[in-house]
Image (cartoon, rainbow, N blue to C red):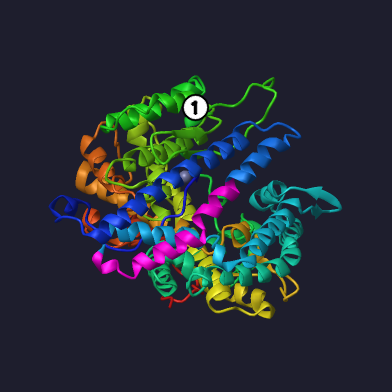
Amino acid sequence: MKMKKILIVLIYVFSLYSCSTEKKDSALQKEVQIYLDAYNKEFQKLLIINNEAQWKLNTMIIDNDTITNKIATLAGEAFAKFTGSKENIEKAKTYLTKKDELKPLQVKQLETILFMAGGNPEIAGEIVKLRIKAEADQTGLLYGYKYMFNGKEVTTNNLDEILRTSDVMNERLEAWSTSKEIGTTLKGGLENLRNLRNQSVQALNYKDYFAYQAAEYNMSGGEVMQSCNGMINDIWPLYRELHTWARYELAEKYKQPVPDYLPAHWLPNRWGQDWTALVNAEGINLDEALKSKSPEWIVQQGEAFYKSLGFNALPKSFYEKSSLYPLPNDAGYKKNNHASAWHIDNDKDVRSLMSVEPNTEWWGTALHELGHIYYYVTYSNPDVPIILRGGANRAYHEAMGSLIGLAAMQKPFLQNFGLVAKDIKTNDTMSMLKEALDYVVHIPWGAGVMTGFENALYSENLSVNEFNKKWWELVKKYQGIVPPNERGEKYCDAATKTHINDDAAQYYDYSMSNVLLFQFHDHIAKKILKQDPHNTNYWGSKATGDFLRKLMYPGASYDWREHLKNNLGSDMSAKPMLEYFDPLLVYLKKVNTGRSYTLPVKIN
Ligand SMILES: [Zn+2]
């Protein structure tokens, strides 16, 4: 579900439509434009080389092929050298001292150039090299770690399986504890990485690495924290019901007294971030209906869906260059089976890497990936410079894909395709509960625990002697979860989450994306389709297509908050999500009658 992206910074409010009325360009504006045109051109050239190399690395994996790897490394280094160069940093900084005299779109591009430089600024010298090495070392430890369970080596998939299915308490505890052992080996590396990440962005005057990542949203670190707290507050009443329900449900399942807080090893996930396995919803069984279809049918119907909304057909090169289906066994090479969408040249060359098979999972995934592809295609237009061709913010891109993925799973939509019988009976409350155990449960975790920890780590320089103390304080406060036993500072439970190591200080993207997705969906259902958000059919709605294209068109060329206000008439808010789950809240309150609640009524 990953989207290949370049980093884009969001700085000033800008209306795209103001260009035509501008007066003649000043000498300075002309000079800056010449610089920006050259930058965009060189950037695109290096981007293509880099993406082509990465593409090959992911689509044609041959044992002992060191050449492809080497080419990709060199391409990555050339790209980093250009974006982080002293010359570009100085040019951008100098021009920005006169930003009042420049056009908003020029300012935006200069800010983006500086932000991208922050990833590997030449002016930070050795620090950048040390950081890159430390990141590679940490990743090596992370993926090379051997998990031992009952004296046997196991994978994290094996451990997850136990946590999802086992009723044997000792076994659960053992699986959970095993999954956390890796933290002890990553702790030192994490402290080192924190220091190096902070130092490398401080060379460009960002306060710290958390603030650096927040700058891409045109926000301060404090504003991100505030925004995260807002989301948690919005969904808290529902989370509190889900927490109470889960305590009683699990106590009964495991034949234990009802605990005040959820023991971490009781939950079906190593971090308690996804509780969907707690419910077996009698839902729609798509697998059966899709079995007789071909993988090609799935991709073609996905494209047909977008065309029904008024989008153009995909460029021919999409089908020629993408890698959409599983490889035959005798292919002689392998490919990465994780789905992704690629924008090779930040222009017309869009591709997807998938291994589509005719089942429910790929039905949702293929439509999700096509959401990214159509977003790429739509913001690749003459009004958006190459370096601003990205999502309005990091969360937008994912929200767009997930929105279409969600719409593609709703009953009326599936009935329209003939994939589900017209008279099918489904248990809507249980389906909704399952959805909430994913989307809602994720928010206190993502916006509360992960973001709170990384803010403390980078912005508050959290002492290495308090990594675990801080972690479990946050877990208890936001998730209402406690560890099964004393977790001293020997452990480093935060570092067991891969993102803490290799995708630092941006985990709130997922929470924001969940929230935005429901805002978009709510708007489309109520304002455009006039349908119940639980039962929509987007198919054939040109007005929905117009709305989506309006959201997608400007890419990252103006402030996402302004963009949201202009198109939805509101700020980012989890209220539409909460409203979607309102019938569930009523149901849970009834189920929880007479039960004790241990989470506070209000958080923060
Ligand atoms: Zn995605």
Q: Is residue 325 left or right of residue 347?
A: right
* Residue 173 locus on image (x, y percent): 73, 61
Residue 215 within the magenta-colored segment of the rendering: no
- Check the image and report above or below for 305 versus 498: above
Q: What stretch is highlighted in magenta?
A: 76-101
Q: In this view, does 529 lie to the left or right of 261?
A: left
Instruction: Determine the image quadrant of residue 131.
Output: bottom right
Residue sitting nearer the eye, 593 or 414 = 414
Total number of numbered discs in the rendering = 1
| Secondary structure that dominates the magenta span | helix
Q: How crowded is mark 1: few (under 14 residues within 10 Å), some or many (20 or more)?
A: few
Residue placed at 49% from the left, 72% from the top?
597
Residue at the outermost right position? 151
- Asked if one can make out residue 542 in the rendered structure from this viewpoint, the answer is yes
- Check the image and report above or below for 309 versus 559: above
Residue sitting nearer the eye, 265 or 512 = 512
* Residue 378 locus on image (x, y percent): 32, 40
Mark 1 vs ligand 1: CB under 8 Å? no
Residue placed at 49% from the left, 43% from the top?
47
* Residue 172 locus on image (x, y percent): 72, 57
Residue 94 within the magenta-colored segment of the rendering: yes
The quarter of the image holding the C terminus is bottom left
Residue sitting nearer the eye, 40 or 327 = 40
* Residue 99 locus on image (x, y percent): 29, 67
- Asked if one can make out residue 245 in the rendered structure from this viewpoint, the answer is no
The secondary element bearing badge 1 is classed as helix
- Check the image and report above or below for 483 versus 350: below
Q: Mark 1 points at which residue?
A: 321
Residue sitting nearer the eye, 286 or 387 = 387
Residue placed at 29% from the left, 48% from the top?
554
Give the residue type that dot 1 points to.
Lys
